[in-house]
Image: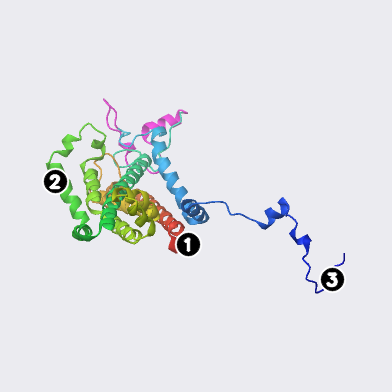
Amino acid sequence: MKKRLFTMHVDLDAFFPASDAEKEYMVQMRPSSTFFKDGIKRLRRNKVAMISFFIIVIIALSSIILPMVWPYSYDAMLGVAPGKPVDMSYNNLAPFTYGYTEQQKIDEGEFVFPHIFGTDSAGRDYFIRVVYGTRISLAVGFFASIIVLIIGMTIGSIAGYCGGIVDLVIMRIVDIIYSLPDTLMVILLSAVLKESGLSEAIEGTVLAKIGSNIISLFIVFGVLYWVSMSRLIRGQILSLREQEYVLAARAAGAKGRWIIPKHLIPNCISVVIISTALQIPNAIFTESYLSFLGLGVNAPMPSLGSLASDALNGIQSYPSRLVIPALVISLIVLSLNLFGDGLRDAFDPKLKS
């Protein structure tokens, strides 16, 4: 039948069931996702952050794997052998040069592994000392940030959720701790721990290699550096505790010790991740300049800061010994800061656009 103009009859052809192909074309469902997955997708699109992340991973893996396969040790003096005179030709070698005994072996056709960064004034391979120093700096930064995270998140959550007199007392304690100079506290703690016999107590343990100065540094991070994290978490929880789901949990009979880990902390996890990522370079830089001042690891265990400090004695003759650890510190801190900025851009809801 021909369709008439201006007719009021219903077109039945428009009510035929749609085919599966037409349904797929018309209905495009977005796959389900979570806040964390969306943040990771945004982070992957940030090329600077991803390059920084891979640089951090490469440096961390190198500091762990290279000492297992490297033929030289960080504390082995190459020119010193039992029952033989000290061979001074190993001291202060330039990069890719060899001592007298090594040169003889090369002339005889033997393979001798090169000293990539040369040796220091004691005849120790400088490359493996830089690798060990990187391992110490990364370990200190990581563990110090974990300490700050645990203490700051716990105290900040309690202050933000409880409020009232509890919040007032905790915030006044935070204000007092803010006024304490961290460098002076490290010096005082190092002196007190030495006098208390801590060095003798840790003798023969794993902690003996790093010394009491690093232990005092961890204590200072646990005592002083958590205040910024606690203030940040407190501010987040003060705004989150007024939400409807918290009120519903309270009405259901839930206590604060259940509401904080189940509802409040997961909803401010983006702030926690960002702050922790930015805390690691701060801890590495603090350890480096304290080691530069002589308050870091005990000799002969190297640190990037102690390597730079030792290089000052021969800076005019061997400037590379100062430049190399300084560049490694700069590369680590810069990569961690750029990666932390990328995390902030990816996980901060206010910066979603």
Task: Give x and y (percent) for residue 4.
Answer: 84, 71
Magenta: main secondary structure equals loop
Question: Which numbered disc, 3 or 1, marks the residue that appears first in the sequence?
Answer: 3
Q: Position of residue 306 (x, y in %)?
A: 28, 47
Residue 93 placed where, x, y %?
A: 36, 41
* Of marks 3 and 1, the one in the foreground: 3
Tag of residue 192 = 2
Q: Is residue 42 toward the left or the right of residue 63 in the image?
A: right
Residue at numbered disc 1: 352
Point out the stretch of residues depicted in magenta.
80-109
**Residue that lies at the very extreme toward the front in this rendered image:** 9
Q: CA distance from mark 3 to mark 2?
A: 102 Å
Which badge, 1 or 2, is on the more N-terminal residue? Answer: 2
Left-right relation of 338 to 124: right
3 vs 2, front mark = 3
What's the distance in space between the residues labelled 3 and 1, CA to CA?
Answer: 54 Å
Label placed on residue 4: 3
Query: What amino acid type is highlighted by mark number 1?
Result: Lys
Q: Is residue 139 magenta?
A: no
Label 1, label 2: how far apart the Cα atoms are: 49 Å
Q: Secondary structure at mark 1?
A: loop
Mark 3 lies on a secondary structure that is: loop
Residue depicted at x 39% and y 33%: 68
The mark found on residue 162 in the picture is none
Single out the residue that lies furthest toward the bottom: 6
For image coordinates 37% across by 52% down, the residue present is: 263
Tell me if I can see residue 213 in this picture.
yes
